[in-house]
Protein backbone atom coordinates (compact mmCIF):
# COMPACT_ATOMS: atom_id res chain seq x y z
CA UNK A 1 0.00 0.00 0.00
CA UNK A 2 1.01 3.57 -0.62
CA UNK A 3 4.18 2.49 -2.27
CA UNK A 4 6.38 4.97 -4.04
CA UNK A 5 7.11 4.59 -7.78
CA UNK A 6 10.21 2.63 -6.73
CA UNK A 7 7.99 0.13 -4.93
CA UNK A 8 9.31 1.13 -1.52
CA UNK A 9 6.68 1.09 1.21
CA UNK A 10 5.67 4.25 3.00
CA UNK A 11 6.86 2.74 6.27
CA UNK A 12 10.28 2.13 4.76
CA UNK A 13 10.48 5.77 3.70
CA UNK A 14 9.35 6.98 7.12
CA UNK A 15 11.99 4.80 8.77
CA UNK A 16 14.65 6.18 6.46
CA UNK A 17 13.54 9.72 7.23
CA UNK A 18 13.46 9.22 11.01
CA UNK A 19 16.81 7.40 10.95
CA UNK A 20 18.54 10.51 9.66
CA UNK A 21 18.17 12.43 12.92
CA UNK A 22 20.24 10.23 15.27
CA UNK A 23 23.25 10.65 12.99
CA UNK A 24 23.23 14.42 13.33
CA UNK A 25 22.91 15.77 16.81
CA UNK A 26 21.07 18.95 15.82
CA UNK A 27 17.83 20.09 14.17
CA UNK A 28 17.87 19.59 10.40
CA UNK A 29 16.29 21.51 7.54
CA UNK A 30 13.88 19.88 5.10
CA UNK A 31 16.56 19.97 2.40
CA UNK A 32 19.12 18.30 4.66
CA UNK A 33 16.67 15.60 5.68
CA UNK A 34 15.73 14.99 2.04
CA UNK A 35 19.37 14.71 1.04
CA UNK A 36 20.46 12.43 3.90
CA UNK A 37 17.38 10.20 3.51
CA UNK A 38 17.63 10.16 -0.30
CA UNK A 39 14.05 11.30 -0.64
CA UNK A 40 12.55 14.00 -2.88
CA UNK A 41 12.13 17.32 -1.07
CA UNK A 42 8.38 17.35 -1.70
CA UNK A 43 7.98 13.84 -0.26
CA UNK A 44 10.13 14.76 2.71
CA UNK A 45 8.06 17.85 3.37
CA UNK A 46 4.79 15.92 3.18
CA UNK A 47 6.04 13.12 5.42
CA UNK A 48 7.38 15.62 7.98
CA UNK A 49 3.96 17.28 8.13
CA UNK A 50 2.24 13.93 8.69
CA UNK A 51 4.81 12.93 11.30
CA UNK A 52 4.44 16.31 12.99
CA UNK A 53 0.69 15.75 13.33
CA UNK A 54 1.54 12.67 15.43
CA UNK A 55 4.34 14.46 17.31
CA UNK A 56 6.95 12.04 15.96
CA UNK A 57 8.90 15.04 14.74
CA UNK A 58 8.79 18.59 15.94
CA UNK A 59 9.67 21.90 14.36
CA UNK A 60 12.00 24.14 16.33
CA UNK A 61 11.58 27.90 16.52
CA UNK A 62 14.49 28.31 14.07
CA UNK A 63 12.63 26.19 11.50
CA UNK A 64 14.76 23.07 11.91
CA UNK A 65 13.22 19.67 12.53
CA UNK A 66 14.03 17.06 15.12
CA UNK A 67 12.49 14.00 16.74
CA UNK A 68 9.37 14.69 18.80
CA UNK A 69 8.86 13.63 22.37
CA UNK A 70 6.25 11.10 21.34
CA UNK A 71 8.75 9.05 19.35
CA UNK A 72 10.80 8.47 22.48
CA UNK A 73 7.65 7.80 24.46
CA UNK A 74 6.45 5.08 22.07
CA UNK A 75 9.80 3.44 21.52
CA UNK A 76 11.39 3.55 24.93
CA UNK A 77 8.71 2.87 27.49
CA UNK A 78 8.91 -0.79 28.38
CA UNK A 79 11.43 -1.45 25.64
CA UNK A 80 13.60 -4.46 26.52
CA UNK A 81 16.64 -2.63 25.16
CA UNK A 82 15.85 0.39 27.30
CA UNK A 83 15.44 -1.75 30.43
CA UNK A 84 18.80 -3.35 29.78
CA UNK A 85 20.50 0.02 29.33
CA UNK A 86 18.89 1.37 32.47
CA UNK A 87 20.05 -1.64 34.43
CA UNK A 88 23.56 -1.40 33.02
CA UNK A 89 24.22 2.32 33.34
CA UNK A 90 25.14 2.58 37.05
CA UNK A 91 27.33 -0.57 37.21
CA UNK A 92 29.09 0.57 34.03
CA UNK A 93 29.68 4.02 35.51
CA UNK A 94 31.17 2.48 38.63
CA UNK A 95 33.36 0.23 36.53
CA UNK A 96 34.64 2.94 34.22
CA UNK A 97 35.44 5.15 37.21
CA UNK A 98 37.39 2.34 38.88
CA UNK A 99 39.11 0.72 35.92
CA UNK A 100 39.70 3.75 33.69
CA UNK A 101 39.10 1.72 30.53
CA UNK A 102 36.63 2.08 27.68
CA UNK A 103 33.49 0.04 28.14
CA UNK A 104 30.67 -1.02 25.88
CA UNK A 105 27.44 -2.90 26.24
CA UNK A 106 26.17 -4.78 23.21
CA UNK A 107 23.40 -7.10 22.16
CA UNK A 108 23.16 -9.51 19.26
CA UNK A 109 20.78 -8.57 16.45
CA UNK A 110 20.93 -11.34 13.87
CA UNK A 111 24.58 -11.48 12.84
CA UNK A 112 25.43 -8.03 14.00
CA UNK A 113 26.44 -6.64 17.32
CA UNK A 114 24.42 -3.58 18.26
CA UNK A 115 26.17 -1.33 20.76
CA UNK A 116 23.61 0.10 23.13
CA UNK A 117 25.99 1.88 25.48
CA UNK A 118 29.57 3.02 25.41
CA UNK A 119 31.58 4.86 28.02
CA UNK A 120 35.00 6.37 28.11
CA UNK A 121 36.97 7.21 31.24
CA UNK A 122 37.62 10.78 30.08
CA UNK A 123 34.01 11.68 29.66
CA UNK A 124 31.80 10.96 32.60
CA UNK A 125 28.86 12.71 31.10
CA UNK A 126 26.77 10.15 29.33
CA UNK A 127 26.96 10.83 25.66
CA UNK A 128 24.93 8.56 23.46
CA UNK A 129 26.43 10.11 20.36
CA UNK A 130 29.22 7.69 21.09
CA UNK A 131 27.00 4.67 20.91
CA UNK A 132 28.76 2.91 18.12
CA UNK A 133 26.09 1.38 15.99
CA UNK A 134 26.60 -2.03 14.51
CA UNK A 135 29.57 -4.28 13.85
CA UNK A 136 29.75 -7.80 12.42
CA UNK A 137 29.55 -10.40 15.19
CA UNK A 138 32.50 -12.59 14.11
CA UNK A 139 34.95 -9.69 14.24
CA UNK A 140 34.24 -8.49 17.77
CA UNK A 141 34.79 -9.97 21.21
CA UNK A 142 31.20 -8.99 22.08
CA UNK A 143 29.82 -10.90 19.11
CA UNK A 144 31.89 -13.99 19.94
CA UNK A 145 30.83 -14.15 23.58
CA UNK A 146 27.19 -13.54 22.60
CA UNK A 147 27.35 -16.41 20.13
CA UNK A 148 29.23 -18.66 22.56
CA UNK A 149 26.38 -18.20 25.04
CA UNK A 150 23.70 -17.76 22.40
CA UNK A 151 21.29 -20.04 20.60
CA UNK A 152 22.38 -22.90 18.32
CA UNK A 153 20.29 -21.22 15.59
CA UNK A 154 22.33 -18.05 15.96
CA UNK A 155 25.59 -19.98 15.73
CA UNK A 156 24.38 -21.79 12.61
CA UNK A 157 23.62 -18.42 11.02
CA UNK A 158 27.06 -17.14 12.00
CA UNK A 159 28.84 -20.18 10.59
CA UNK A 160 26.78 -20.29 7.38
CA UNK A 161 28.06 -17.00 6.05
CA UNK A 162 31.26 -15.70 4.58
CA UNK A 163 33.50 -14.13 7.22
CA UNK A 164 34.83 -10.78 6.13
CA UNK A 165 38.43 -9.99 7.04
CA UNK A 166 38.87 -6.57 8.69
CA UNK A 167 42.40 -6.82 10.04
CA UNK A 168 45.17 -9.42 10.17
CA UNK A 169 43.63 -11.02 13.24
CA UNK A 170 39.96 -11.20 12.19
CA UNK A 171 38.92 -14.85 12.29
CA UNK A 172 37.82 -15.91 8.82
CA UNK A 173 38.35 -19.69 8.97
CA UNK A 174 35.33 -21.67 10.09
CA UNK A 175 37.35 -24.02 12.32
CA UNK A 176 39.21 -21.14 13.99
CA UNK A 177 35.89 -19.52 14.76
CA UNK A 178 34.45 -22.76 16.18
CA UNK A 179 37.53 -23.21 18.37
CA UNK A 180 37.26 -19.63 19.59
CA UNK A 181 33.58 -20.07 20.49
CA UNK A 182 34.28 -23.33 22.32
CA UNK A 183 37.06 -21.73 24.31
CA UNK A 184 34.84 -18.72 25.07
CA UNK A 185 32.14 -21.07 26.30
CA UNK A 186 34.62 -22.82 28.60
CA UNK A 187 36.32 -19.71 29.92
CA UNK A 188 33.33 -17.37 30.02
CA UNK A 189 35.39 -14.60 28.47
CA UNK A 190 36.67 -13.63 25.03
CA UNK A 191 39.71 -11.49 24.33
CA UNK A 192 40.02 -10.36 20.70
CA UNK A 193 43.14 -8.47 19.78
CA UNK A 194 42.89 -6.10 16.88
CA UNK A 195 40.03 -7.93 15.19
CA UNK A 196 38.46 -4.65 14.08
CA UNK A 197 40.79 -1.93 15.34
CA UNK A 198 44.44 -3.02 15.02
CA UNK A 199 45.74 -1.32 18.15
CA UNK A 200 43.24 -2.48 20.76
CA UNK A 201 41.93 -5.57 22.47
CA UNK A 202 38.31 -6.18 23.34
CA UNK A 203 37.64 -8.28 26.43
CA UNK A 204 34.02 -9.40 26.69
CA UNK A 205 32.03 -11.24 29.33
CA UNK A 206 28.41 -12.34 29.07
CA UNK A 207 25.53 -10.74 30.91
CA UNK A 208 23.27 -13.70 31.54
CA UNK A 209 19.51 -13.67 31.38
CA UNK A 210 17.80 -16.82 32.50
CA UNK A 211 19.95 -19.93 32.39
CA UNK A 212 23.02 -19.94 30.20
CA UNK A 213 21.86 -17.52 27.54
CA UNK A 214 23.70 -14.25 27.32
CA UNK A 215 21.40 -11.28 26.79
CA UNK A 216 24.25 -8.83 26.44
CA UNK A 217 28.01 -8.58 26.31
CA UNK A 218 29.98 -6.24 28.54
CA UNK A 219 33.28 -5.30 26.95
CA UNK A 220 36.40 -3.50 28.08
CA UNK A 221 38.52 -2.06 25.29
CA UNK A 222 42.20 -1.65 26.18
CA UNK A 223 45.37 -0.82 24.23
CA UNK A 224 47.31 -3.89 23.06
CA UNK A 225 49.82 -4.89 25.71
CA UNK A 226 47.69 -3.59 28.58
CA UNK A 227 45.34 -6.58 28.80
CA UNK A 228 45.56 -7.15 32.52
CA UNK A 229 43.04 -9.99 32.48
CA UNK A 230 43.55 -11.00 36.12
CA UNK A 231 42.34 -7.58 37.20
CA UNK A 232 39.88 -6.82 34.42
CA UNK A 233 37.89 -10.02 34.08
CA UNK A 234 36.72 -10.37 37.70
CA UNK A 235 35.54 -6.77 37.71
CA UNK A 236 33.76 -7.13 34.38
CA UNK A 237 32.00 -10.20 35.78
CA UNK A 238 31.13 -8.33 38.94
CA UNK A 239 29.48 -5.58 36.88
CA UNK A 240 27.77 -8.13 34.59
CA UNK A 241 26.23 -9.80 37.64
CA UNK A 242 25.12 -6.40 38.97
CA UNK A 243 23.39 -5.68 35.65
CA UNK A 244 21.71 -9.06 35.77
CA UNK A 245 20.48 -8.52 39.30
CA UNK A 246 19.18 -5.04 38.45
CA UNK A 247 17.14 -6.63 35.67
CA UNK A 248 15.42 -8.72 38.31
CA UNK A 249 17.06 -11.96 37.16
CA UNK A 250 17.79 -14.52 39.82
CA UNK A 251 21.45 -14.28 40.81
CA UNK A 252 21.46 -18.00 41.44
CA UNK A 253 24.62 -19.51 40.10
CA UNK A 254 28.00 -18.18 39.22
CA UNK A 255 27.66 -18.63 35.51
CA UNK A 256 30.21 -17.03 33.32
CA UNK A 257 33.36 -18.93 34.03
CA UNK A 258 34.78 -22.41 33.99
CA UNK A 259 31.98 -24.94 34.27
CA UNK A 260 33.55 -28.09 32.97
CA UNK A 261 30.77 -30.20 34.42
CA UNK A 262 28.11 -28.44 32.35
CA UNK A 263 27.27 -30.21 29.12
CA UNK A 264 27.88 -28.18 25.99
CA UNK A 265 24.99 -27.55 23.63
CA UNK A 266 24.87 -30.27 20.99
CA UNK A 267 26.12 -28.05 18.19
CA UNK A 268 29.46 -27.46 19.85
CA UNK B 1 -1.99 9.93 1.33
CA UNK B 2 -2.95 6.35 2.02
CA UNK B 3 -5.71 7.43 4.30
CA UNK B 4 -8.17 4.93 5.67
CA UNK B 5 -11.90 5.27 4.94
CA UNK B 6 -12.14 7.26 8.18
CA UNK B 7 -9.64 9.76 6.80
CA UNK B 8 -6.99 8.78 9.31
CA UNK B 9 -3.46 8.82 7.94
CA UNK B 10 -1.41 5.67 7.74
CA UNK B 11 1.15 7.22 10.05
CA UNK B 12 -1.56 7.85 12.64
CA UNK B 13 -2.57 4.18 12.46
CA UNK B 14 1.01 3.02 12.75
CA UNK B 15 1.53 5.25 15.77
CA UNK B 16 -1.62 3.85 17.38
CA UNK B 17 -0.45 0.32 16.69
CA UNK B 18 3.05 0.87 18.04
CA UNK B 19 1.71 2.72 21.09
CA UNK B 20 -0.11 -0.40 22.25
CA UNK B 21 3.05 -2.28 23.18
CA UNK B 22 4.42 -0.04 25.96
CA UNK B 23 1.16 -0.45 27.87
CA UNK B 24 1.51 -4.22 28.03
CA UNK B 25 4.86 -5.53 29.10
CA UNK B 26 4.67 -8.74 27.04
CA UNK B 27 4.39 -9.92 23.44
CA UNK B 28 0.89 -9.46 22.03
CA UNK B 29 -1.14 -11.43 19.50
CA UNK B 30 -2.49 -9.85 16.32
CA UNK B 31 -6.00 -9.93 17.79
CA UNK B 32 -4.91 -8.23 20.98
CA UNK B 33 -3.04 -5.54 19.07
CA UNK B 34 -6.06 -4.98 16.80
CA UNK B 35 -8.38 -4.69 19.78
CA UNK B 36 -6.16 -2.36 21.85
CA UNK B 37 -5.37 -0.15 18.84
CA UNK B 38 -8.99 -0.16 17.62
CA UNK B 39 -7.92 -1.35 14.18
CA UNK B 40 -9.42 -4.07 11.98
CA UNK B 41 -7.55 -7.38 12.32
CA UNK B 42 -6.70 -7.45 8.62
CA UNK B 43 -5.25 -3.92 8.75
CA UNK B 44 -3.32 -4.80 11.88
CA UNK B 45 -1.89 -7.90 10.26
CA UNK B 46 -0.82 -6.01 7.14
CA UNK B 47 0.75 -3.15 9.11
CA UNK B 48 2.62 -5.62 11.34
CA UNK B 49 4.08 -7.31 8.27
CA UNK B 50 5.21 -3.97 6.85
CA UNK B 51 6.65 -2.91 10.20
CA UNK B 52 8.39 -6.28 10.56
CA UNK B 53 10.12 -5.74 7.22
CA UNK B 54 11.71 -2.64 8.75
CA UNK B 55 12.40 -4.38 12.09
CA UNK B 56 10.15 -1.95 13.94
CA UNK B 57 8.29 -4.94 15.34
CA UNK B 58 9.47 -8.48 15.74
CA UNK B 59 7.70 -11.80 16.00
CA UNK B 60 8.64 -14.00 18.93
CA UNK B 61 9.01 -17.75 18.67
CA UNK B 62 5.63 -18.15 20.41
CA UNK B 63 3.94 -16.09 17.67
CA UNK B 64 3.48 -12.94 19.78
CA UNK B 65 4.63 -9.56 18.53
CA UNK B 66 6.70 -6.91 20.24
CA UNK B 67 8.77 -3.85 19.39
CA UNK B 68 11.86 -4.53 17.31
CA UNK B 69 15.35 -3.44 18.20
CA UNK B 70 15.38 -0.96 15.35
CA UNK B 71 12.56 1.10 16.86
CA UNK B 72 14.65 1.73 19.96
CA UNK B 73 17.69 2.40 17.80
CA UNK B 74 15.91 5.08 15.74
CA UNK B 75 14.11 6.74 18.61
CA UNK B 76 16.66 6.69 21.38
CA UNK B 77 20.04 7.38 19.86
CA UNK B 78 20.78 11.06 20.35
CA UNK B 79 17.27 11.69 21.63
CA UNK B 80 17.22 14.74 23.93
CA UNK B 81 14.80 12.90 26.24
CA UNK B 82 17.11 9.91 26.38
CA UNK B 83 20.13 12.09 27.18
CA UNK B 84 18.19 13.73 29.99
CA UNK B 85 17.14 10.39 31.47
CA UNK B 86 20.68 9.05 31.23
CA UNK B 87 22.01 12.11 33.00
CA UNK B 88 19.36 11.90 35.69
CA UNK B 89 19.40 8.21 36.50
CA UNK B 90 22.46 8.01 38.80
CA UNK B 91 21.73 11.19 40.82
CA UNK B 92 18.13 10.03 41.22
CA UNK B 93 19.28 6.62 42.41
CA UNK B 94 21.58 8.22 44.96
CA UNK B 95 18.78 10.49 46.11
CA UNK B 96 16.16 7.76 46.45
CA UNK B 97 18.63 5.61 48.40
CA UNK B 98 19.38 8.47 50.79
CA UNK B 99 15.96 10.08 51.19
CA UNK B 100 13.69 7.04 50.93
CA UNK B 101 11.01 9.00 49.08
CA UNK B 102 9.36 8.55 45.71
CA UNK B 103 10.98 10.56 42.96
CA UNK B 104 10.01 11.52 39.46
CA UNK B 105 11.58 13.37 36.59
CA UNK B 106 9.27 15.17 34.19
CA UNK B 107 9.38 17.43 31.18
CA UNK B 108 6.78 19.80 29.78
CA UNK B 109 5.14 18.79 26.53
CA UNK B 110 2.69 21.54 25.60
CA UNK B 111 0.30 21.73 28.55
CA UNK B 112 1.06 18.28 29.87
CA UNK B 113 3.73 16.97 32.12
CA UNK B 114 5.41 13.88 30.70
CA UNK B 115 7.05 11.71 33.33
CA UNK B 116 10.24 10.26 31.91
CA UNK B 117 11.48 8.55 35.06
CA UNK B 118 10.03 7.47 38.36
CA UNK B 119 11.66 5.69 41.26
CA UNK B 120 10.42 4.26 44.49
CA UNK B 121 12.54 3.51 47.54
CA UNK B 122 11.26 -0.06 47.76
CA UNK B 123 12.27 -1.04 44.29
CA UNK B 124 15.83 -0.30 43.38
CA UNK B 125 15.63 -2.15 40.13
CA UNK B 126 14.79 0.33 37.45
CA UNK B 127 11.32 -0.39 36.21
CA UNK B 128 10.10 1.80 33.43
CA UNK B 129 6.65 0.27 33.63
CA UNK B 130 6.22 2.74 36.43
CA UNK B 131 6.92 5.72 34.26
CA UNK B 132 3.65 7.47 34.76
CA UNK B 133 2.71 8.92 31.44
CA UNK B 134 1.11 12.32 31.26
CA UNK B 135 -0.67 14.61 33.68
CA UNK B 136 -2.08 18.12 33.21
CA UNK B 137 0.54 20.74 34.07
CA UNK B 138 -1.61 22.96 36.30
CA UNK B 139 -2.45 20.10 38.66
CA UNK B 140 1.10 18.94 39.41
CA UNK B 141 4.03 20.49 41.24
CA UNK B 142 6.24 19.46 38.30
CA UNK B 143 4.04 21.31 35.83
CA UNK B 144 3.97 24.43 37.98
CA UNK B 145 7.74 24.63 38.43
CA UNK B 146 8.25 23.95 34.71
CA UNK B 147 5.90 26.78 33.82
CA UNK B 148 7.39 29.11 36.45
CA UNK B 149 10.78 28.64 34.81
CA UNK B 150 9.40 28.11 31.33
CA UNK B 151 8.69 30.31 28.36
CA UNK B 152 6.15 33.15 28.41
CA UNK B 153 4.46 31.40 25.46
CA UNK B 154 4.00 28.27 27.53
CA UNK B 155 2.51 30.26 30.41
CA UNK B 156 0.11 32.01 28.05
CA UNK B 157 -1.04 28.60 26.78
CA UNK B 158 -1.48 27.39 30.36
CA UNK B 159 -3.50 30.44 31.38
CA UNK B 160 -5.64 30.48 28.22
CA UNK B 161 -7.35 27.19 28.96
CA UNK B 162 -9.94 25.92 31.36
CA UNK B 163 -8.38 24.45 34.48
CA UNK B 164 -9.88 21.09 35.35
CA UNK B 165 -10.43 20.38 39.03
CA UNK B 166 -9.08 16.99 40.14
CA UNK B 167 -9.20 17.30 43.94
CA UNK B 168 -10.19 19.96 46.47
CA UNK B 169 -6.77 21.56 46.22
CA UNK B 170 -6.31 21.69 42.44
CA UNK B 171 -5.85 25.31 41.43
CA UNK B 172 -8.60 26.31 39.03
CA UNK B 173 -8.69 30.09 39.50
CA UNK B 174 -6.48 32.02 37.13
CA UNK B 175 -5.26 34.45 39.79
CA UNK B 176 -4.41 31.63 42.23
CA UNK B 177 -2.39 29.95 39.51
CA UNK B 178 -0.56 33.20 38.67
CA UNK B 179 0.25 33.73 42.35
CA UNK B 180 1.51 30.17 42.66
CA UNK B 181 3.77 30.57 39.62
CA UNK B 182 5.16 33.85 40.92
CA UNK B 183 5.92 32.33 44.29
CA UNK B 184 7.49 29.29 42.60
CA UNK B 185 9.66 31.62 40.56
CA UNK B 186 10.83 33.44 43.68
CA UNK B 187 11.40 30.40 45.84
CA UNK B 188 12.67 27.99 43.20
CA UNK B 189 10.45 25.24 44.52
CA UNK B 190 6.78 24.23 44.38
CA UNK B 191 4.97 22.13 46.94
CA UNK B 192 1.51 20.96 45.83
CA UNK B 193 -0.54 19.12 48.36
CA UNK B 194 -3.09 16.70 47.07
CA UNK B 195 -3.54 18.45 43.75
CA UNK B 196 -3.94 15.13 41.94
CA UNK B 197 -3.68 12.46 44.62
CA UNK B 198 -5.41 13.60 47.85
CA UNK B 199 -3.00 11.98 50.30
CA UNK B 200 0.35 13.12 48.98
CA UNK B 201 2.42 16.22 48.40
CA UNK B 202 4.64 16.78 45.38
CA UNK B 203 7.74 18.91 45.93
CA UNK B 204 9.38 19.97 42.69
CA UNK B 205 12.57 21.82 41.84
CA UNK B 206 13.74 22.87 38.39
CA UNK B 207 16.58 21.24 36.49
CA UNK B 208 18.01 24.16 34.59
CA UNK B 209 19.33 24.06 31.06
CA UNK B 210 21.01 27.21 29.85
CA UNK B 211 20.05 30.35 31.73
CA UNK B 212 16.84 30.40 33.71
CA UNK B 213 14.86 27.90 31.65
CA UNK B 214 13.95 24.66 33.32
CA UNK B 215 14.39 21.65 31.06
CA UNK B 216 12.96 19.24 33.60
CA UNK B 217 11.38 19.05 37.03
CA UNK B 218 12.69 16.78 39.75
CA UNK B 219 9.94 15.88 42.18
CA UNK B 220 9.77 14.14 45.54
CA UNK B 221 6.39 12.69 46.43
CA UNK B 222 5.77 12.35 50.17
CA UNK B 223 2.72 11.56 52.32
CA UNK B 224 0.87 14.64 53.60
CA UNK B 225 2.32 15.72 56.93
CA UNK B 226 5.79 14.43 56.11
CA UNK B 227 6.91 17.37 53.98
CA UNK B 228 10.24 17.99 55.61
CA UNK B 229 11.17 20.81 53.23
CA UNK B 230 14.33 21.88 55.11
CA UNK B 231 15.81 18.45 54.47
CA UNK B 232 14.22 17.61 51.13
CA UNK B 233 14.66 20.77 49.10
CA UNK B 234 18.45 21.16 49.44
CA UNK B 235 18.94 17.54 48.44
CA UNK B 236 16.58 17.83 45.49
CA UNK B 237 18.53 20.88 44.36
CA UNK B 238 21.80 19.05 44.82
CA UNK B 239 20.56 16.24 42.56
CA UNK B 240 19.10 18.73 40.06
CA UNK B 241 22.50 20.41 39.77
CA UNK B 242 24.18 17.02 39.35
CA UNK B 243 21.80 16.23 36.47
CA UNK B 244 22.54 19.58 34.91
CA UNK B 245 26.28 19.07 35.17
CA UNK B 246 26.02 15.57 33.70
CA UNK B 247 24.24 17.08 30.71
CA UNK B 248 27.31 19.19 30.11
CA UNK B 249 25.60 22.42 31.10
CA UNK B 250 27.76 25.05 32.74
CA UNK B 251 27.22 24.89 36.50
CA UNK B 252 27.76 28.62 36.66
CA UNK B 253 25.31 30.17 39.02
CA UNK B 254 23.18 28.86 41.81
CA UNK B 255 19.91 29.23 40.03
CA UNK B 256 16.91 27.64 41.56
CA UNK B 257 16.31 29.62 44.67
CA UNK B 258 15.72 33.14 45.90
CA UNK B 259 17.04 35.60 43.38
CA UNK B 260 15.21 38.76 44.24
CA UNK B 261 17.62 40.84 42.22
CA UNK B 262 16.75 39.01 39.00
CA UNK B 263 14.10 40.72 36.92
CA UNK B 264 10.99 38.64 36.34
CA UNK B 265 9.96 37.93 32.76
CA UNK B 266 7.58 40.62 31.57
CA UNK B 267 4.52 38.36 31.65
CA UNK B 268 4.73 37.85 35.42
Image (spheres, coloured by chain):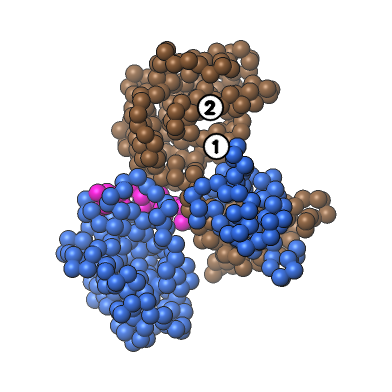
Chain colours: A brown, B blue
Find out whether residue B92 is within the magenta segment.
yes
Q: Position of residue B203 (x, y in %)?
A: 27, 66
Which span of residues is magenta-colored?
B77-97
Q: Residue at x 41, y 60 (%)?
A: B132
Q: Position of residue A229 (x, y in %)?
A: 37, 19
* SS assignment at label 1: strand
Q: Quadrant of the N terminus of chain A?
A: bottom right
Q: Is residue B106 above or below residue A245?
A: below
Q: Residue at x 44, y 32 (%)?
A: A210
Which residue carries the number 2 mark?
A: A150
Q: Is residue A24 visible from the viewing direction of this image? A: no
Q: Position of residue B213 (x, y in %)?
A: 38, 68
Membership of B27 in magenta stretch:
no
Q: Which residue is mark 1?
A: A114
Q: Is residue B164 left or right of residue A94?
A: right
At 55% from the left and 66% from the top, the residue drawn is A60
* Residue A13 in the image: above or below residue A248: below
Q: Residues within 10 Å of mark 1 (few under 14, many from 20)?
A: many
**Foreground of the two, B231 or B58:** B58
Amino acid sequence: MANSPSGESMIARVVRLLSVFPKYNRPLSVREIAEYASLPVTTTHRLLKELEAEDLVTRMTDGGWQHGTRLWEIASRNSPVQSLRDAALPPMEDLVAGLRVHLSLAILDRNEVLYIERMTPNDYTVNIISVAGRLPAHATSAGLILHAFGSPDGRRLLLSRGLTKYTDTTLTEMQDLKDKLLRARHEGVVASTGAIIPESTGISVPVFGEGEYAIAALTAIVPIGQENLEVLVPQLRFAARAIRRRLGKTPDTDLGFVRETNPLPSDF
